[in-house]
Amino acid sequence: MAKIKVYLDNCTYNRPFDDQSQIMIALETEAKRHIQRLITEKIIDLVYSYMSRLENDDNPYTTRKNSIDTFFKKAALYIDSNHAETTEEKASSIMQSGIKSRDALHIACAIKGACNYFITTDKPLLRFKCHEIIICNPIQFLDYYEEEKDEFN
């Protein structure tokens, strides 16, 4: 049976490096760490893209950048820039809803990778609704995962 596929955006990867004194940030960090364990243990599949790499390469913090880059190696699928034309078309339609271009490209890459979930901590992205993929924060994902894991595994 197919595994659950997830795509994490850059703000989710960076969540553990944010100020943990805020309870929601701390909870999202713990949820993100649990998602990482599920990926590391190959219970769910990670998809990442040329946009993930591009944004991580722009990260000014070397430790963070290297940590995230190392985690990319656990991915089951990489959406490269050879898919840029189709992802750009999809991103254009997403941008009509007011989503910024880089964020729209991330969502389009996740859809191209046939992901079930796009995981973000970005509030404007969490308000965006898409019939092709579920957009949720790390905590919401774990709720979905607990409800659906038997269907996938």
Image (cartoon, rainbow, N blue to C red):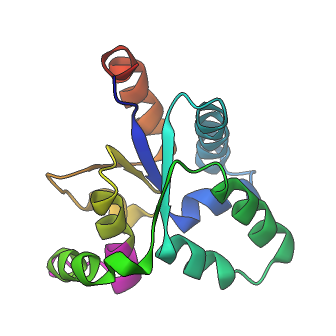
- Location of residue 131 in the rendering, given as x and y in whole percent from the top left corner: 14, 52
Q: Can the viewer see residue 143 in this picture?
A: yes
Nearer to the camera, 123 or 83: 83
Which quadrant of the figure has residue 3?
top left
Horizontal relation, residue 118 to residue 92: left or right: right
Q: Is residue 100 magenta?
A: yes
Q: Can the viewer see residue 19 in this picture?
A: no
Nearer to the camera, 129 or 24: 129
Tell me: residue 34, above or below residue 60: above
Residues shaded magenta:
96-105
- Location of residue 5 in the rendering, given as x and y in whole percent from the top left corner: 40, 42
Tell which residue pokes out farthest to the front in this image. 82
Which quadrant of the figure has residue 61?
bottom right
Question: Which quadrant does the N terminus fall into?
Answer: top left
Tell me: residue 152, above or below residue 45: above
Horizontal relation, residue 11 to residue 99: left or right: right
Instruction: Write the residue at 84% across / 76% down.
Output: 62
Instruction: Write the residue at 57% across / 57% down.
Output: 12
Nearer to the camera, 13 or 22: 13
Tell me: residue 62, above or below residue 16: below
Instruction: Write the residue at 35% across / 67% down.
Output: 109
Tell me: residue 138, above or below residue 124: above
Horizontal relation, residue 25 to residue 99: left or right: right
